[in-house]
Structure formats: structure tokens, C-alpha cells
Image (cartoon, grey):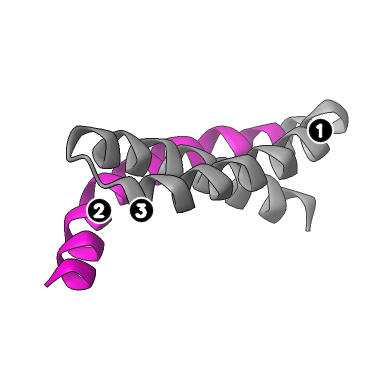
Amino acid sequence: MTETALFLSAFFTVFLLVFQQQNVIHRHRGWGTITSLAIGTAQLTLWRYVPEATIPQLAAALIGGPVGFNAALWAHPLIVKRTTA
């Protein structure tokens, strides 16, 4: 369970940071505001579990980041295009 929470919180932290970077580049203010709140939530979850994490749990968190990075680069244009079209 903790491995899943760490993977997902790392995934969403990095996903949302990359998504936010794209929002800034393209000046999507509404998306930027929503994403900022979501980043805080994901980071709070990550900070909650990391201090007492075991090696497998830390591995789950480390894997979540790169997966989140690539997912955000793929998803941002699809999500923004769908909502602004």
C-alpha cells in the first residue's frame, strides 16, 4: 500500500510540475492555478511517506518520477487541446 502511495505521489508531483511548466510556457493561467493546488497536494502526500520509507518504497517513489515526466509531456497537449477546443 505504501509503495503505491509513494509511486503515485511521486508520479503526480513530477507529472504536475512538468504540466505546470507547459502551462507557464503557453500562458495557460487557469490551468496553472489548478495545477498549483494539485502540486501542493501531491507533495504533501510524498513528504508524508518518504521519511519512514523502506528501500522498496523509495524505489517506487523513484520510478514514479520518470514515468510522471513522460506521461505529462504526452498528456499536456491532449488535455489542453480538448478543453480549449
Q: Amino acid at mark 2?
A: His
Q: Residue at x 23, y 70 (%)?
A: 83
Percent x, y of residue 53: 81, 33
- The alpha-carbon separation of the residues under discs 3 and 2 comes to 14 Å
SS type, badge 3: helix
The residue at the far left in this view is 85
Marked residue nearer the N-terminal end (3 or 2):
3
Alpha carbons under labels 3 and 1: distance apart: 38 Å
Q: Is residue 36 or residue 5 the one in the foreground?
A: 36
Quadrant containing the C terminus in the rendered view: bottom left
For mark 2, does the 10 Å Cα neighbourhood hold few (<14), some (14 to 19), or many (20 or more) residues?
some
Amino acid bearing label 3:
Gly
Please tell me whether residue 9 is drawn above or below residue 53 in the rendered image. below
Q: Please state the extent of the stretch shown in magenta in the rendering.
A: 58-85
Q: Within the magenta stretch, is there residue 23?
A: no
Tell me the residue that label 2 is attached to: 76
In the depicted view, which residue is nearer to us: 64 or 72?
72
Nearer mark to the viewer, of 3 and 1: 3
The residue at 81%/38% (across/down) is 48
Residue 78 is a magenta residue: yes
What kind of residue is marked 1?
Answer: Thr
Residue, disc 1: 54
Mark 3 surroundings: few (<14), some (14-19) or many (≥20) residues within 10 A: few
Where residue 65 appears, x then y in whole percent? 48, 36
Question: Which residue matches tag 3?
Answer: 30
